[in-house]
Image (tube, rainbow, N blue to C red):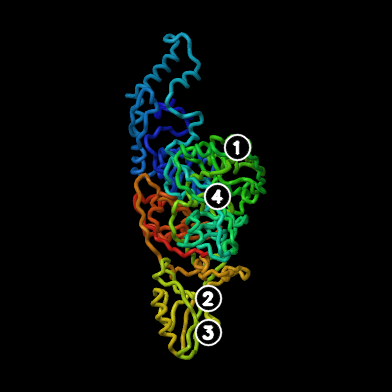
Amino acid sequence: LCAECGQFHLLPDNHLYNFQDEVDDELICHICLQPLLQPMDTPCGHTYCFKCLENFMQEYNFCPMDRKKLSFQQCHKSSLLVRNLLDKLVVICPFKAECQQTMQRCELEAHLQNRCPGFKKYKSELQRKKNPISKGKEDPPAKVETNTPKDPEVPSGGSSLVAESSAAAVVSLGTAEPGLVNPAFEETEEDLPQRASLVAETSTIEIHREDPEEELGMRIVGGKDTPLGNIVVQEVLRDSVIAADGRIAPGDHILEVNGVNISSVTHCQAVSFLRHPGPVLHLMVLQEKGFSNKTAQQDSTSATNREVIHVTLIKRDRSEPLGIKLIRKTDEAGIFILDLLEGGLAAKNGKLSRNDRVLSINGQDLRQGTPETAAQIIQTSESRVNFVVLRQLGVQVLDPGEDGSMSNNSSSSSNGGSPVHHRRRLDQNHYRRKSNYQKGYISHEKTVAIKKEPKESLGITIGGGRDNKNKLPIYVTSVQPIGCLFRDGRIKRGDVLLSINGIDLTHLNYYEAVSALKSNAASHSVVLKALEILSSDSTDPSLDIKERGFSWSPLWITWLGLPSYLHCCQDIVLSKGNLESWGFSIVGGFEESKGNQPFFIKTIVPGTPAFRDRRLKCGDEIVAVNGVPAIGMSNSELIPMLKEQRNKVTLTVVSWPGSLV
């Protein structure tokens, strides 16, 4: 029994404490998942326990969180302020049967030595046991150990256990790419409420429409060609078919359309599937129900069927990543699969699923294991990695841990974190990309000079305007078969109009733009500057998907090719209490393999400050945090910045409307 903390643990391991209150995730070591002891800061901005980091660095030469190269000599003690905050955490005396005292962590040792009746009793019993005069028959050592520390509730192997106050942690396994190590779902699930789990379920919804070609009336974002990965409902239009049905809400992830899996298709392919006419549409959606308490979660798990599954993955070489993200839940032992990275070995194999509980890897029991232990087993295995997992059929309980989360969570399997028909925000989505990032799309500026009759019409209709709720630039919605622009042929539907005869159109509202176009169309010559969004893939139908009666508007993905000077940013100020989470997860950020990617909101959890505010939307791009630009940051750099904001944060975001289906 340790005389300093009053609990049993191995000598090289950290002390163990029973904390009175939930401990903020910022004060948790992401190696042992316990509140920090002798905290050490790394040059890359992460903090770990001295012993945890020292032990880790004996085997590895990188930071556990972002895998940047690291040596122990580069690390230094955390600030005095941080150390004092940790020392002042309130703990409960481990001898609860004889002593109900609480005190600051730094006072526990003195309490045990001088004031605790339970520890005094333990020492006297130990002394009697050692002294054959006072007790003729010596009790077996095991009996003394089990009887005495009745209340230090630390099972054997306590060093690997997570204190109930610890937040869940997510670890991305088997990859050396910094962007994949800290999934956004892991980290961006900002301080998710501890002792609660994020509950989501899949359901099949049958949509009926009298007119087979009537639009469904929802906007979607995402796709495998975007960091969001899945197809996410951004907005449900009022008085639409979907709104009348009432079961689909913003934030729901659409997994299947009429039996076709669309969780790993491009944005344009998903739009085509959803626009397909028919009287009945079968949709499988993943819907988030928010946080559930421990009891409710246990009830739901006990009510579902389970099966044990054996899966073997074959690595081509020892260093090949499996592409699995694991999570540890706060209220359930063991580790669970949070996500399978698109294109990874596990995703290609197809036999593992999200939320599978990992029972063992290569014969090593992980029923009480940690993600770190699993990572070490996988990384040290040669070619075959044998999984035994427990699969629960029915409700999926997804624990946030961070991310997450997933700087690359655009995986082919559905990600946890979509809302249910708990009225999520009917808002839209955007994620901004500069033209040099926009995968598959480029913007091309052109100048069109036309000679015309004074009374001849331009022959175009326009949309957008800065008075639009998305503050869009002015764009061409149609080129009529009458008028000079149709005859000229260079201005096309979808072009963004920049100016006419030198008059800037980029900051005008809709009516101002109509007035400017009409007044300048009366002259003999017109000079239009426009921006055309081009697909670099000639086979990509994204700019001209069959409309089938749908009112035309640009696809969400085409807005992403606009240069940043056409983006209209909005500041959103969120406030929260000390015990609340911000309630959103992010994807994106700098990755060595992909370069700079924008940060996007992937999940907004019902009942949290981000949800209640109703302005932040899934798919919004985070441009800055408290005025500090996010462009060029990695996931592991932005997350601490968000977590540092205690009660108030200002997010600068850009939104584009989703594709209408």
Q: Which amino acid does the dot numbered 1 rest on?
A: Ser
Q: Which amino acid does the dot numbered 4 rest on?
A: Ser
Q: Are the residues at dot 3 and dot 1 in contact (C-beta closer than 8 Å)?
A: no
Q: Is residue 354 visible?
A: yes
For label 4, the SS is strand
Residue bearing the label numbered 2: 493
Q: Which amino acid does the dot numbered 3 rest on?
A: Ile
Sequence-wise first label, 3 or 2? 3
For label 3, the SS is loop
Sequence-wise first label, 4 or 2? 4
Q: Are the residues at dot 3 and dot 4 in contact (C-beta closer than 8 Å)?
A: no
Query: Which mark, by number, is residue 482?
Result: 3
Query: Which of the pair 550/597 is nearer the observer?
Result: 550
Sequence-wise first label, 1 or 4? 4
Query: Which mark, by number, is residue 203?
Result: 4
Residue bearing the label numbered 1: 360
Tell me what residue is drawn at x 37 percent, y 44 percent: 579
Q: How far is mark 2 from mark 1, CA to CA?
A: 57 Å
Front tag of 3 and 2: 3
Q: How far is mark 4 from mark 2, CA to CA?
A: 38 Å
Query: Which of the pair 395/537 is nearer the observer?
Result: 395
